[in-house]
Amino acid sequence: MTQTLPQELEQLEATEFDAGLVFSGAASGNMVRGYSSPCSCTPVADSTYIFHESARDVVVWFMNKLDPLYLYGPAGCGKSSLVKQLAARLNYPVFNVTAHGRMEFSDLTGHVSLQNGNMVYQYGPLALAMRYGALFIMDEVDLLPPEVAAGLNGILEGQPLCLPENGGELIHPSPMFRFACTANTNGNGDDTGLYQGTLRMNLAWQDRFMVSSVDYPAADVEKALLARLFPTLPDSITSKMVDFANEVRGLFMGTSDTSINTIEATLSTRTLIRWADLTLKFQPLAHQGIQPLSYALDRALAFRTAPSTRAMLHELVQRVFPVENVSLGE
Ligand SMILES: Nc1ncnc2c1ncn2[C@@H]1O[C@H](COP(=O)(O)OP(=O)(O)OP(=O)(O)O)[C@@H](O)[C@H]1O
Ligand SMILES: [Mg+2]
């Protein structure tokens, strides 16, 4: 007979791992708690994932019983995947929700539903994570309505969760329960206008978190990442793609030393991966007269920018890749 999710979670056995062995492959003598085996809620470990500098804070957070974690950084830099990939290495079950303007507290805690003619209370993701010792991740937390956020204040401090709809059941947090959030802003609203819908978080809410900033991986990390993901793309190309991405990021931030003005678009790690992928996918069509790198760049990023930015991006491609019909490998 198939197990229910609570039955599966009930059977998890906590264990200790050597943090160095798990995260970097070299024993460190520092221990971190996780579970002896994965379950259906444990993220699948991505063998191409590279832990880089931004992982440091999250590793320390996993190793110690610290306050809830608030990770913020630009779109597509790797916030959500970082926490999930660390959790995967520890066999941690993860309940991942994405905040939105219409989220209600019961979406997190649970609700009464009809099962075989009976009204049954079903735990929501937060209740399950607290009860069975999982990692609860709320992505895009700066979209969460302040009144729902305020309802979580007690939980963030380690207090039990009360479920009035389930006869007032009190769920005391398991010692393995962890609470992490990710967002594009640090909770103080968005002055740039790029992250529509983000809210200024309540100060008392913000005060309950350990805060960590995640940035794009360093150039050598992104180069290694592209090499792992797309081994048929020559290093000379992937290396220039990363340089191009960093130039675009510099133009976006206004920190580039070129004479070109700042632009409204940036090139995230997510977009970089998409660009490399599309370049390979369109390479076989080069005989039709398309230039795979430029063609893929349009579809990965440039089509969603202003015409002047798009023209500028193509100018930059021509500069970074002087001979476009370079061999892209197999
Ligand atoms: N260090 C890394 N190693 C491997 N892949 C990575 C790394 N960093 C980011 N990625 C990849 O980049 C993509 C974007 O990552 P992710 O979704 O974690 O970004 P995010 O910062 O949470 O984005 P958003 O701001 O949109 O929520 C994913 O496909 C992820 O696997
Ligand atoms: Mg994310």
Image (cartoon, rainbow, N blue to C red):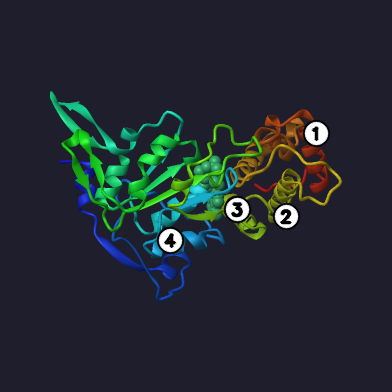
Q: Identify which amino acid the numbered label 2 is placed on.
A: Ser
* Label located before the other in sequence (1 or 4): 4
Determine whether the beta carbon of the residue marked 3 sits less than 8 angstroms from the nearest atom of ligand 1: no
Secondary structure beneath label 4? helix
| Most distant residue in the front direction | 204
* Label located before the other in sequence (2 or 3): 3
For label 2, the residue is: 236
- Residue at image point 53% right, 44% down: 187
Q: Is residue 43 left or right of residue 172?
A: right
Q: Identify which amino acid the numbered label 1 is placed on.
A: Ala
Secondary structure beneath label 2? helix
Secondary structure beneath label 1? helix
Is there CB contact under 8 Å for labels 3 and 1? Answer: no
* Whole-percent x, y for residue 242 in the image: 69, 51
**Which dot marks residue 61?**
4
Q: Identify which amino acid the numbered label 4 is placed on.
A: Trp
- Residue at image point 61% right, 41% down: 274
Callout 3: 10 Å neighbours few (<14), some, many (20+)?
A: some
> What is the spatial separation of the Cα atoms under label 4 and label 2, in whole angstroms?
37 Å
Determine whether the beta carbon of the residue marked 2 sits less than 8 angstroms from the nearest atom of ligand 1: no
**Which dot marks residue 311?**
1
**Which dot marks residue 215?**
3
> What is the spatial separation of the Cα atoms under label 2 and label 3, in whole angstroms?
24 Å
Callout 1: 10 Å neighbours few (<14), some, many (20+)?
A: few
